[in-house]
Image (cartoon, helix red, strand yellow):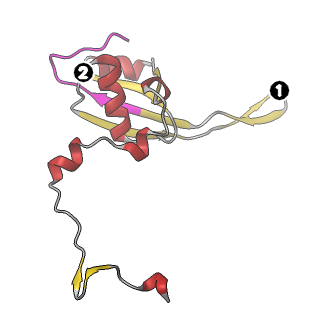
Amino acid sequence: MAFFSKTKSEKGAERKPAEVSKKEIMKAPVLAQSEAFEDARSVILRPRVTEKAALLNERHTYVFEVARNATKRTVARAIQMLYKIEPVAVRIVPIRSKTLFMKGKRGSTQRGKKAYVELKATDKIEV
């Protein structure tokens, strides 16, 4: 069975992957995730303007609605591209779909994701 045989460059010597440090991995672009998004605007859909978000703005935390398949890393890179600011932390929370009953018909709200983006005390985003 050729599928399970090991590839060897020389007799008796196996190929080893190149040693890469963790810092180099973090600096490398995330192609697999970022290829799904054409630009930063497809990751960050809109700012979420609520009372809770307004209170969090005072503590340098901003809330955005993001694409359903967005990750912390893609959101952080999109913030860097759009606002030229590096976030300190990014937290992503799913928004559940809620069922509605209106005018005798049953429906549901749209589900999605929201991201809490924390910035340094000196940085600010105009929402």
Q: Which residue is mark 2?
A: 85
The residue that appears at 48% across and 85% down in the rendered structure is 2
The residue that appears at 50% across and 34% down in the rendered structure is 67
The residue that appears at 42% across and 18% down in the rendered structure is 51
Provide the major secondary structure of the magenta segment.
Answer: loop
Q: Is residue 104 above or below residue 17?
A: above
Farthest residue in the front direction? Answer: 10
* Callout in the foreground (2, 1): 2
Q: In front here: 81 or 114?
A: 81
Q: In front here: 34 or 118?
A: 34
Q: CA distance from mark 2 to mark 1?
A: 46 Å
Is 66 magenta? The answer is no
Mark number for residue 103?
1
Mark positioned earlier in the residue sequence (2 or 1):
2
Q: Quadrant of residue 72?
A: top left
Q: In front here: 109 or 23?
A: 23
Residues in magenta, as a range: 115-127
Q: In front here: 4 or 61?
A: 4
Q: Indicate the secondary structure of the residue bearing disc 1.
A: loop
The residue that appears at 31% across and 33% down in the rendered structure is 76
Residue type at tag 2: Ile
Tell me where residue 14 appears, x and y as whole percent.
24, 80
